[in-house]
Amino acid sequence: MKPNKITNRMSFGMWLSFTLLATGIAGLFWVVLETSFRVNYKNENMEVLDRAIWAAMEKYTSPEFEDNLRFIAGSGEYFIQLVSEREQQLLLALDNQGQESQVQAEGIIPDNLFDLLDEGKGFCSYCIEDTVRNMEWAVEAMVVANQEGYRIVLVFSKSLANVSSLIHPLRARAVFALFVVLVIASFLSLMITRRFAGPINRLTEMAKQLAEGNYAVAFPKGGCYEVEQLSETLEMAAKEFNATEALRREFVANISHDMKTPLTVIKMYAEMIQTVSGENKTKREAHLERIITEVEKLNGLISDTMELAKLQSGTWELKMETFDLSHLVRSARLSFAVHQESRELQIDLETEEGLYVYADRKLISRVLENFISNAVKFSGDMKKIRIKTKREYGMIKTTVQDFGAGIEAEKLPYIWERYYKVDPFGTNKSGTGVGLHIVKEILQMHQAQYGVSSEPGKGSCFWFRLKAAKW
Ligand code: ADP
């Protein structure tokens, strides 16, 4: 698909979404307004009636009671009746102009008015359908006096105009407002779309190039904050891809070299057995010994690579148990005792009993072996290694320190990356650069803290901290 087509489709889609959204919000606003208007209309009328009837009732004993009723009826458009319980006799009836009128009482005062007043302890309010005039009334009635055992009741009523007829003129205006909103929203969304779609389209093009393997691609800057963030993230991803690709190439070169060397040696000794030492038992056994050593080297290389693949596939299941880390450290040190004898290497150990942790024993042992074997490999002429395991603020901290080559500060952050070797062509060519990456994976699986401090020429100190467990 051509970029123009993408832009057009994307722009149209965005424009349509924004416009529909704005129109939807405006429409929703109207629906909520109309519904709440309908619901509140009756309640508000009742409240108005309530206030009026209380105001009128306060003056019942005063001589201006009737004049006051006329005034209230005229000013508030209420229909007011004064009814006696004796045969429901109408003592006074005022229309909404404050004039005396008998007509409106029918349809407003129900036959069971006094039953309702009994239930409401002298007060009642209701809405009633007036079949005579085909309209609805809001009514409130209140007992104001008792004459000769008959209750005198004040009845206030207000016609509830047809809500729809009130809303109708507003609705026509709402349609016009909706149309104006639609035009404005359409125009605004066109502007917003232009601002978004352009940079996104450029990003899409660049991301495609990235997918095709062009890691040097430069992502455009500018546009809104989100687009800029996306651009930066893609740029970071490109850098990561680039670095991983470089490491992968280096690893392939390393591993081919690492595999080729033992294979050449194996082939050479096998040929020697075939042609020279076949009959000579002592020589033959020495050559076979060499072959076995090289095969073991190859085996280690392959199992390292496989172990990493397994750890990273997410299928590795931790076998957690509580054990004394000091015992594990002691036995890890013992397995390097052979170096102590052959290279006059001194491995000091400082620890105490009872440093319990809850972890995968096999994997933690792998971490220790890696730290110690690196310390042995890189300790150079300073033939001394110091291992410490101690309790520290509810944690158990283990450090493996050597006094050898050390690592330059700018290279330190990379040593945990897979396939990374500080000096890939140095004297120590046997490593694959995978060991510390495996360590990192293991310690992260245990949610353990870990790190290294190092100074070139002075040595390195690798450490990790596990939560202390109760035994
Ligand atoms: P390798 O198999 O190459 O040892 P690692 O992942 O264990 O792989 O280590 C990565 C790199 O970190 C090593 O190649 C080495 O350059 C550096 N490194 C690790 N431990 C030490 C150490 N104790 N002293 C100096 N450099 C070290």
Image: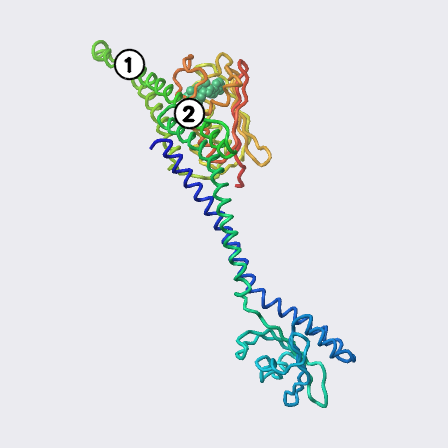
Residue at image mark 2: 418
Res. 307 image quadrant: top left
Give how far across and how far down residue 441 sits, in percent. Answer: 44, 31
Which of these two is toward me, 132 or 209?
Answer: 132
Residue nearer the viewer, 266 or 325:
266
Quarter of the view holding residue 91: bottom right
The residue nearer to you, when weighing 319 against 213, is 213
- Identified by mark 1, the residue type is Thr
> Type of residue at label 2?
Arg
* Distance from mark 2 CB to nearest ligand 1 atom below 8 Å: yes
| Element at label 1 | helix
Which residue is identified by label 1?
264
Q: Is residue 185 left or right of residue 71?
A: left
Using the numbered discs, state the Cα–Cα distance from disc 2 to disc 1 in whole angstroms. 26 Å
Find residue 288 and report its horizontal and vertical position in percent: 28, 16
SS assignment at label 2: loop
Please provide percent x and percent y for residue 23: 48, 49
Identify the residue at image location x=61%, y=81%.
Answer: 105
Position of residue 437 measured from the top left corner of the image (x, y, whole percent): 43, 27
Name the residue at 36% across, 34% down: 5
Is there any visible trace of residue 369 in the rendered image?
A: no
Query: Where does ligand 1 appear, by image quarter?
Result: top left
- Indicate left or right for 51 with 269 as reference: right
